[in-house]
Image (cartoon, rainbow, N blue to C red):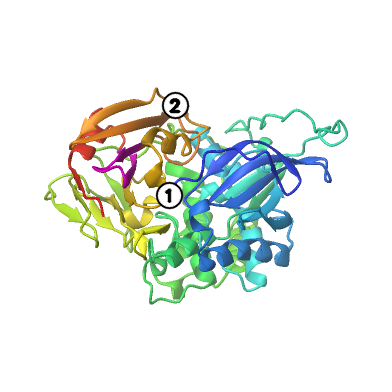
């Protein structure tokens, strides 16, 4: 997981940039004002470290083409595409002011009839994709968005644009809140496809929502994988209280382990859901009691989806502690219990002697660390090129997380290196805590960069202990 540059652009594609909306492994999303539309837009920009990877660039651009091709009001709208001066592509889209379904579920209770209404609308959006032969492959609460109407934004715009409106709050249990706008589906699973293309992982999906066949590179993934995702979304929406019997039967068939046992596509799933409701088996208007979503804690469990359902797998205890060394032999680290290492180099970062700069990802699940906020882990990389002339503090200044709360930058001497360490917490999306660390190796020609997302409940010395366990060698 390589963070994007923290520098805020002033303008992208003629749109004035206001602030950062979110960042991931492959792209950043900015809030901008489009003077031509006289409205606020979301602008998705490919991350710097993927700019020279033609496979990643193509997959990024494919998302915009597919969304324009389907042109459904149930999918996030694409206004235009373009390239920055450095050649990175960007997509200008509508801004989903109401947030995501993930935000709704984390905020509190959801009425059962609200859950049913949302699920039906998501199924209709996916059916629009299937009608064009497109499989989404990553139906998660974070990819279901609410676009609320913003009366007055465009008519009150001045030459410089109006002051940025705050996203309206969506009461979690208010059925009318999510009926006051359009529920749309975004991110056509391409972040996962890009991860596969980059070699970070062969998987294409998010744990807990992806179909079993998506975890097998040799399997064929078709519309039935999205049916599985719809079923898992339904189970998440209704929660522990569960849906009524007829709807429960639909969700059970949708999440069958074997694709042949599921509905053939989203349209068939939607019709089965409608039949369960019209037959008189509509979920009663009840509130399910639930606490705020909690991330996986140290010494607790990660959930693994198997044919038998959701099984708790303890990845933290009773595992041998090992040492991982990268392919170059320049990075060695003592792994926390239950963690393992993957990676053949720092993608998008060339080595001084050709190939990729040395790097690895360590995590209980390295393949999903990039995409799953609940999976802790760390990225460790060495750079002998342009970063060699940059002091650690200056390097970290370009790798900030503006939406998180920043602790004071500190220094610590670990494993005979002087590390500069920046910690970010209270992040509204993605990883809850992110720690950035950088140090110059002996001789000053090699910069070591480490990004850590500690396990929930980890010791306050977790990051320092991890840095202490590393053996890093200059080229």
Q: Does residue 427 lie above or below 186 as drawn?
A: above
Task: Identify residue for label 2.
Answer: 406
Residue 1: x, y in percent? 40, 50
Q: Quadrant of the C terminus?
A: bottom left
- Residue at (82%, 42%) from the top-left corner? 35
Residue farthest front in this picture:
443
Task: Identify residue for label 1.
Answer: 386
- Residue at (36%, 59%) from the top-left corner? 351
- Residue at (62%, 50%) from the top-left corner? 44
197 part of magenta stretch: no
Side of 419 relative to 260 (left or right): left
Q: Quick one: label 2, few (<14), some, or many (20+) residues within 10 Å?
A: some
Q: Which residues are magenta?
A: 437-454
Decide if residue 459 is in sight here.
no
442 part of magenta stretch: yes
Toward which corner of the image does residue 300 lie, by quadrant? top left
Toward which corner of the image does residue 264 lie, by quadrant? bottom right
Side of 88 relative to 222 (left or right): right
């Amino acid at each position: 997981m390589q963070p994007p540059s923290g520098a805020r652009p002033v303008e992208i594609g003629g749109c004035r940039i206001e602030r950062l909306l979110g960042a991931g492994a492959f792209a950043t999303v900015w809030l901008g004002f489009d003077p031509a539309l006289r409205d606020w837009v979301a602008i998705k920009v490919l991350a710097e470290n993927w700019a020279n990877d033609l496979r990643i660039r193509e997959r990024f651009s494919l998302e915009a083409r597919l969304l324009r091709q389907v042109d459904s009001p149930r999918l996030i709208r694409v206004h235009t595409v373009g390239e920055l001066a450095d050649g990175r592509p960007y997509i200008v889209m509508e801004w989903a002011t109401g947030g995501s379904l993930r935000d709704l579920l984390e905020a509190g209770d959801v009425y059962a009839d609200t859950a049913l209404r949302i699920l039906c609308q998501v199924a209709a959006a996916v059916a629009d994709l299937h009608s064009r032969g497109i499989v989404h492959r990553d139906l998660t609460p974070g990819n279901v968005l609410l676009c609320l109407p913003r009366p007055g934004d465009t008519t009150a715009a001045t030459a410089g644009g109006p002051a940025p409106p705050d996203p309206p709050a969506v009461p979690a249990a208010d059925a009318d809140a999510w009926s006051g706008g359009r529920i749309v589906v975004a991110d056509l699973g391409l972040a996962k496809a890009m991860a596969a293309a980059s070699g970070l992982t062969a998987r294409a999906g998010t744990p807990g929502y992806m179909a079993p066949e998506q975890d097998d590179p040799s399997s064929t993934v078709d519309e039935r994988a999205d049916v599985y995702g719809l079923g898992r979304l339904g189970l998440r929406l209704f929660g522990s209280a569960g849906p009524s019997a007829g709807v429960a039967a639909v969700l059970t068939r949708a999440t069958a382990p074997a694709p042949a046992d599921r509905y053939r596509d989203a349209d068939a799933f939607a019709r089965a859901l409608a039949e369960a409701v019209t037959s008189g088996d509509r979920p009663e208007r009840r509130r399910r009691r639930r606490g705020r979503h909690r991330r996986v804690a140290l010494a607790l469990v990660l959930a693994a989806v198997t044919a038998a359902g959701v099984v708790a797998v303890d990845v933290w205890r009773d595992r041998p502690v090992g040492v991982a060394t990268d392919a170059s032999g320049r990075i060695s680290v003592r792994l926390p219990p239950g963690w393992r290492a993957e990676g053949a180099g720092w993608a998008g970062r060339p080595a001084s002697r050709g190939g990729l700069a040395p790097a690895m990802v360590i995590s209980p699940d390295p393949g999903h660390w990039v995409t799953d906020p609940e999976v802790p882990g760390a990225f460790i990389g060495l750079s002998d090129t342009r970063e060699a002339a940059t002091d650690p503090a200056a390097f970290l200044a370009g790798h900030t997380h503006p939406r998180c709360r920043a602790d004071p930058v500190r220094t610590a001497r670990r494993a005979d290196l002087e590390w500069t360490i920046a910690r970010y917490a209270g992040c509204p999306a993605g990883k809850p805590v992110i720690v950035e660390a950088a140090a110059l190796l002996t001789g000053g020609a090699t910069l070591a960069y480490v990004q850590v997302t500690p396990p929930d409940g980890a010791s306050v010395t977790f990051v320092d202990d991890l840095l202490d366990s590393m053996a890093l060698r200059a080229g």
